Structures are given as C-alpha cells and as structure tokens.
Amino acid sequence: MKVLVIGSAGMVGRKLTAALLKNGRIGDRAIAQIILADIVAAEAPATSIPIASHAVDLSAPEAATKLLAERPDLIFQLAAIVSGEAEADFEKGYRINLDGTRHLLEAIRQQPDYCPRLVFTSSIAVFGEPLPPEIPDEFPLTPLTSYGTQKAICELLLADYSRRGFVDGIGIRLPTITVRPGKPNKAASGFFSGIIREPLAGLEAVLPVDEGVRHWFASPRAAVNFLLHAAQLDTSGLGQRRSLTMPGLAATVGEEIEALRRVAGDKAVSLIRHVPDETIALIVAGWPQAFSAKRAESLGFVAEKNFDDIIRAHIEDELGGRIG
C-alpha cells in the first residue's frame, strides 16, 4: 500500500506519519511507501519504509496531479490554514482550504481506473448558531465563519465525488485538538491549548474568553487514532453521508483549568492571565459546545472521557511524562 499525507509538516501530520511508520501497515495491508507533501517539505525520518517528501502548494495548477504520480492507495488530506487566518484573509482561506481540496479531487477523477481512499479532515466549525445544547448527527451544516464554510463545501464535494465513484472518501470533523504542542498559531481556538501548554512549561498564558465558555475537545493522540481508523473503515455503511462528527469531550474553560489544577497544581493555574479579546470571543461564541457523536462511536471511533486524560496525554507525549 502506498500512502500520501498532504499537510504532513503540521502537528497532526507529523504525528500521523510517526504512527504510520511505527505500525508499518493499515489494517492487514503493509505500507510499501509513504509520500509526504506540504507547503514546506516535512523532514523524512530514517526508516525501512521508503519515504518521499515534497514541498508543494496544493492550490497551484497541476500540483495535485504531480502528487498522484505514484497512484497512492490511501490519501490523507490534512492541509489547511487555520480558522483565525482564514477569517482574516478571505482570498487565502478559499484558495488553500477550498481550491486545494477541489484540485485534489479533480486530479483523482482524471486518473483512469483509480479510486483511492481519501480521508479528509473537516471541522466542527461547519456548524453555527442557532445551535442546540448538544448537536445530533442529523443537524444541518450552518457555518458562521469562512473557515467553516470552506470545510462544509469540501464535505459536499467529498460526498459527490464518492457518490460518482471517483474516490472512496470519508470526512472526519475533528473536535478542537488540545493540547497542541509547540508555539501558538493563528487559530482562534489556540488559547484552549495555550492555557494548558504554557503553564505546564512554567510560562504565562493569556485567556481571551470567559471561563464559562464550553467547547468540544479531543487530544492529538485521539486525532491520529481517528485518522488511522478512518483509513481502514468499511465505508459501505456510510451511504451518501460521508462525513462524521468525531467523539470528544464537552468541557468549559473553567473545567479545563480545574483539570490543570488537579494534574499540575495551583502554581500552574496562577500563570493564566485573563485578557479579554472581543474578536476571539465573538468567533468562539458561534461555535458548537457539545455533540452526540453516535454514528462515529457506532463505527468504532473513540476519544477521551475527561480533561485530566487529555492533559496527561500531553505530558506523556510531549514532556516525557514530567512537568516543567
């Protein structure tokens, strides 16, 4: 099996690549080659599995066609700019988040006798107000941001190209992935990770919203497992509804902070400073708070059940099991 990871230089892409190399197979099929692609070439680790790494802008003409030269059996499409950046730069958001995926689907369609599995990372941002307290699987797509709109359009394209038999697609709507390692990015949701990540490293963190804000979370570890499970899932039971809301954990910012207190103590919590940001608060206010992800759960997708476990996963995976 040949595997293509688009967006491989990002946090989830790097962790997914590491998991693919560690496992060496998808289900009962051994991985024969991994192709990495991103706007900057991802570092290709030394491994017995052949790896090719490319710097490519998927929204550029013919870029997708070149990536398909090896006719990968499995494609992960993770590439996107984040919510805050897509909102600030309208044209860039549509070019990267929509046109890139559309070009990929078209390049696949143009290949004769070719129908790969395509795992597309969507987002809970495809839903927007007015929202029920818990969103069921049947709730319509009602995005209130450009980012959410771009993801919703891609979901529709994925379903239509799958219906026509051009691709075997599955879209997974990721919860907000927390705790993200590394430096803060331009995502409006970045503070959810920052108020955990920075205090655990002994650094001050800024909280731009009220502690009563409630949201839907899963860890990077869970996100990688979602992707791997989607890669080998029997999609015949999905019908025309090719995108799934992933399981997660509903928690308020205050509950997130209390989990940090339980795991790391009062000293870590004292490093969080509340600095209101009306722009971020307005964006976050239109986001979903909780889901009933029964479809995904019935298909074997699983996530954490409490925020303490999300924090401990970060400490184990990024801090070597130690704080500070």
Image (tube, rainbow, N blue to C red):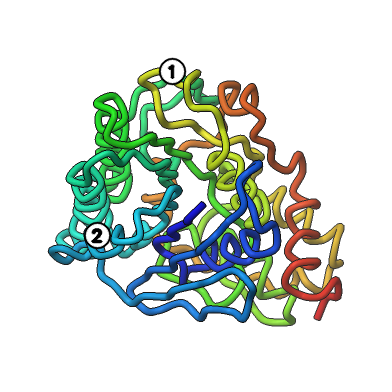
Q: Nearer the viewer, residue 254 or 262?
A: 262
Q: Which residue lies under the disc numbered 2?
A: 64
The C terminus lies in quadrant? bottom right
Q: Nearer the viewer, residue 56 or 208?
A: 56
Q: Give the residue at mark 1.
A: 138
Is 54 in front, or is 252?
54
In front of the other: label 1 or label 2? 2
The mark total stands at 2
Q: Earlier in the sequence, mark 1 or mark 2?
A: 2
Q: Position of residue 45 (x, y in %)?
A: 59, 79
Up-down: is 19 above or below 143?
below
From this view, report whether residue 217 is shown above or below residue 260. Answer: above
Secondary structure, mark 1, is loop
Residue 7 picture location, percent across and down: 41, 64
Question: Which secondary structure, mark 2?
Answer: helix
Left or right: where does residue 316 sit relative to residue 272?
right
Marks 1 and 2 in Cβ contact (< 8 Å): no
Figure quadrant of residue 96: bottom left
Horizontally, residue 151 falls left or right of residue 47, namely: left
Residue plotted at (72% across, 57% down):
257
Residue at coordinates 41% horizontally, 21% vertically from top-left? Answer: 139
- The three-letter code of the residue at mark 1 reads Glu
Q: Three-letter amino acid code at disc 2?
A: Ala
Q: Residue at x 46, y 77 (%)?
A: 42
Q: Is residue 1 visible?
A: yes
Label 1 packing within 10 angstroms: few (<14), some (14-19), many (20+) = few
Q: Residue at x 86, y 67 (%)?
A: 265
Determine whether, in the image, residue 97 is placed left or right of residue 123: left
Residue 122 seen in the figure: no
